[in-house]
Amino acid sequence: MKLARAININDLRKMAKARLPRMVFDYIDGGADDEVTLKHSVSRFDDYQMTWRSLLDVSHIDTSTTIMGQDTTLPFFISPTASTRLFHPAKGELAMAGAAEKAGVIYACSTLASHTLEDIAKATSGPKWVQIYVWRDKELVRNFLARAKEAGFTGCILTVDLPVPGNRERDPRNQFSLPPRPSLSLARQTITKPRWAWDLVSGGKIEVANFKELARVQDQGGLVGFVNSQFSRGVTWSDVEWMREFWGPGFAIKGISRGEDVKRAIDVGADTVWVSNHGGRQLDTSVPVIDLLPEIVEAVGGRADIIADGGVRRGSHVAKLLMRGATGVALGRASLYGLGAGGEAGVLRALTIMEDELRRTMALLGATKISELDPNLMRAPLQ
Ligand SMILES: Cc1cc2nc3c(=O)[nH]c(=O)nc-3n(C[C@H](O)[C@H](O)[C@H](O)COP(=O)(O)O)c2cc1C
């Protein structure tokens, strides 16, 4: 099916499902436990209803804004996602970064990227941020961040909602492994996806590209082994300060869900608080982000930017998060469905769909710029 025939993100999801082996599609599409948070994060947007201002001149809509010090033409951007070559073995992160630059949005790269920071930097001159977890080995983190700075990444995102990996039940059911290992199950699932299989074989092994020094750990235990060897369950707020100091301004803490943690994040020097439940992949039955925002906004008290993500599949979802007080909105699966559907062109299609929908929503609301996305235009449901 041609990408232009995708008229919404759900169409791209269907195309990605048709192109990818089941275990790969489910790795993107799935969530933790009973996937309650995953489903609820999307459906909760429908419970927020909008009114509009009539007879205003909406012939020019300006969607530009500034997120964590970065000027951007759109209030949404690409969220960090691990091992992106899995979803598009030929170009992975390079396709994401290329599409982001063309669409004029920020690209945020995962610590667990399958291309090096330097290669990603070569593929785009657009704005880019890098994401990191809190690891046992500080030296490794320091080197990674220094390389990111050198390569031109201007924002650092520390993800704190993954002390242990969530229980994603689709993965063991599909005998999913990362990197994919030859098995009967993989053969069965790829037999009808020759394009993906060819790209995988010709593109070389998928690895945690920025930590080649840990290749042996990866060879033994794959991504999960890597995560378990590096992630520390004993990390607390005091371990974050050195990282903020090392990086400097442009530091976000991602995966916050409570006002009290907002205060701690700001105390350790974060200039952006990122409200997220990791797309429903970690703690199931956690609260949808749109419901959390008032508590977060109050705790922030104008001292930091707020990024929100989770379940965003429509331009109107972006508008609703902004109306609830977010400064910027991150897209996880919306861009990954595009990638799976058609590489860089697919991601660009996803970003274009989101932009068109946001512009239309703003015109219908009578809002010509982001600052006019007034909370009074929306009614929150009774809790
Ligand atoms: C396949 C996949 C991989 C992800 N990998 C990472 C990661 O490496 N680091 C991170 O901070 N978040 C990661 N996330 C979470 C996203 O950055 C984002 O918070 C989440 O996907 C937002 O929800 P949405 O997918 O409903 O938009 C991942 C999400 C998905 C779907």
Image: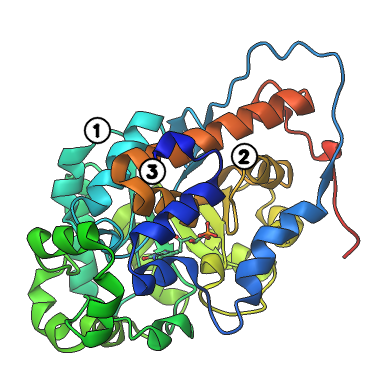
Residue 378: % across, % down: 83, 42
Looking at the image, tell me whether mark 1 or mark 2 is earlier in sequence order.
1
Secondary element at tag 1: loop
Using the image, determine if residue 284 lies above or below residue 156: below
Secondary element at tag 3: helix
Judge left or right: residue 326 versus residue 268: right
- The quadrant of the rendering that contains the C terminus is bottom right
Residue at image x 33%, y 65%? 82
Callout 2: few (<14), some (14-19), or many (20+) C-alpha neighbours within 10 Å?
many
Callout 1: few (<14), some (14-19), or many (20+) C-alpha neighbours within 10 Å?
few
Q: Which residue is label 3 attached to?
A: 347
Residue at image x 17%, y 69%? 207
Looking at the image, tell me whether mark 3 or mark 2 is earlier in sequence order.
2
Image depth: mark 1 or mark 2 in front: 2
Amino acid at pointer 2: Gly
Separation of marks 1 and 2 at Cα, in angstroms: 26 Å
Amino acid at pointer 3: Val
Separation of marks 3 and 1 at Cα, in angstroms: 17 Å
Q: Which residue is label 1 attached to?
A: 125
Q: Nearer the viewer, residue 18 or 289?
A: 18
- The quadrant of the rendering that contains the N terminus is top left
Amino acid at pointer 1: Ser
Image depth: mark 3 or mark 1 in front: 3
Judge left or right: residue 293 versus residue 192: right
Residue at image x 44%, y 75%? 238
Q: Which residue is label 2 attached to?
A: 315
Q: Which of 104 and 232 is in front in this view?
A: 104
Residue 152: % across, % down: 23, 41
The image's mark for residue 346 is none
* Colour treatment of the image: rainbow
- Picture quarter containing residue 199? bottom left
